[in-house]
Image (cartoon, rainbow, N blue to C red):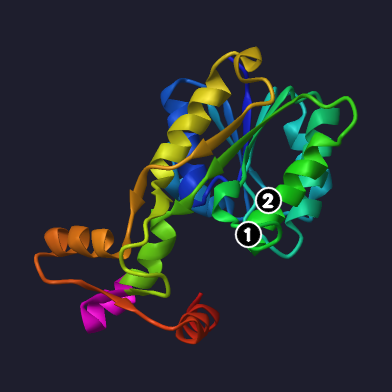
């Protein structure tokens, strides 16, 4: 089976991909900033190789990715996402990688062109990779909003006010996805025949829930009454810039 190189292997999503591949007896190289962290996260396996490097260590990446047929590309930096993804993809293709599976962003989250900075970063990155001459296959996974991202904020407001907060109407449904669902699809694509997925794009979501729906679920799980509180756009902005 093809060797898979995983970028961002110690993040929640990347770690799930590594574990899923190892369970399928796939040879995996995990590219991480902290090798000791990776050693603690993953059980020892003859199929796992850990390489320590950062987004700036392109020579390290170039040497390590040679001999791999597939690359899982997960970049969390929004400082220069396009530049980072393009550089790693170009080196990978030139080294012989035949398939890149990239974590992008659902374009359904952007109501109009350039209205969502997260989606815009991912769109520019996709366009840059697709433009690489003589490249291999490029599969883009486009998940909707991560459940886990919102739990980071919910845990504080629920703890102190028994409420979750947002600036959209309480009955307005939005799309959410579990990182587990994303990792399962990534593992499938990375282990199935490359020609089966070619240059496919997969829009992904798990649930369509409103603020009230989420409050009801948390109430049931926590065994106490959780409300959804509508706050102004200014309050939302201050909360996001102050804590996110």
Label 2's element?
Answer: helix
Q: From the viewer's perspective, is 51 left or right of 167?
A: right
Front-lying residue, 95 or 86 = 86
**Which quadrant of the view contains residue 42?**
top left
Residue at point 51%, 86% (across, down):
234
Front-lying residue, 16 or 207 = 207
Q: Can residue 60 be seen in the rendering of this structure? A: no
Say if the magenta span includes residue 159.
yes
Say if the magenta span includes residue 85.
no
Pointer 2 with pointer 1, Cβ within 8 A: yes
Front-lying residue, 42 or 24 = 24
Q: Residue furthest right?
A: 133
Coordinates of residue 100 in the picture (x, y in percent): 68, 31
**Which quadrant of the view contains residue 54?**
bottom right
Relative to 207, say whether 145 is above or below.
Answer: below
Q: From the viewer's perspective, is 218 left or right of 14?
A: left
In the image, the segment drawn in magenta is 155-164
Residue at point 79%, 42% (across, down):
127
Label 1's element?
Answer: helix
Give the overall secondary structure of the magenta segment: helix
Question: Label for residue 118?
Answer: 1
Relative to 155, say whether 191 is above or below.
Answer: above
Relative to 55, say whether 202 is above or below.
Answer: above
State the separation of the CA atoms marked 2 and 1: 7 Å
Q: Which residue is mark 2?
A: 122
Front-lying residue, 209 or 23 = 209
Coordinates of residue 157 in the picture (x, y in percent): 30, 78
């Amino acid at each position: 089976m093809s060797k898979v190189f995983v970028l961002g292997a110690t993040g929640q999503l990347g770690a799930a991909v590594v574990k899923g591949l190892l369970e399928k007896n796939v040879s995996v190289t995990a590219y991480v900033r902290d090798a000791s962290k990776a050693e603690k996260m993953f059980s020892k396996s003859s199929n796992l190789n850990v390489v320590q490097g950062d987004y700036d260590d392109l020579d390290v990446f170039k040497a390590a990715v040679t001999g791999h047929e597939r690359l899982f590309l997960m970049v969390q930096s929004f400082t220069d996402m396009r530049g980072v993804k393009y550089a790693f993809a170009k080196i990978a293709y030139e080294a012989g990688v035949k398939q890149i599976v990239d974590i992008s962003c659902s374009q359904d989250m952007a109501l109009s062109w350039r209205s969502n900075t997260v989606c815009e970063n991912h769109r520019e990155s996709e366009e840059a990779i697709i433009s690489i001459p003589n490249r291999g296959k490029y599969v883009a996974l486009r998940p909707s909003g991560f459940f886990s991202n919102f739990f980071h904020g919910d845990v504080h407001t629920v703890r102190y006010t028994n409420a979750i907060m947002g600036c959209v109407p309480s009955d307005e449904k939005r799309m959410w996805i579990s990182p587990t669902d994303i990792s399962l699809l990534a593992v499938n694509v990375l282990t199935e025949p490359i020609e089966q997925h070619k240059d496919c794009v997969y829009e992904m979501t798990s649930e369509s829930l409103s603020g009230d729906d989420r409050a009801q679920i948390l109430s049931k799980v926590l065994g106490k009454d959780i409300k959804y509180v509508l706050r102004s756009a200014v309050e939302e902005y201050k909360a996001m810039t102050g804590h996110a």
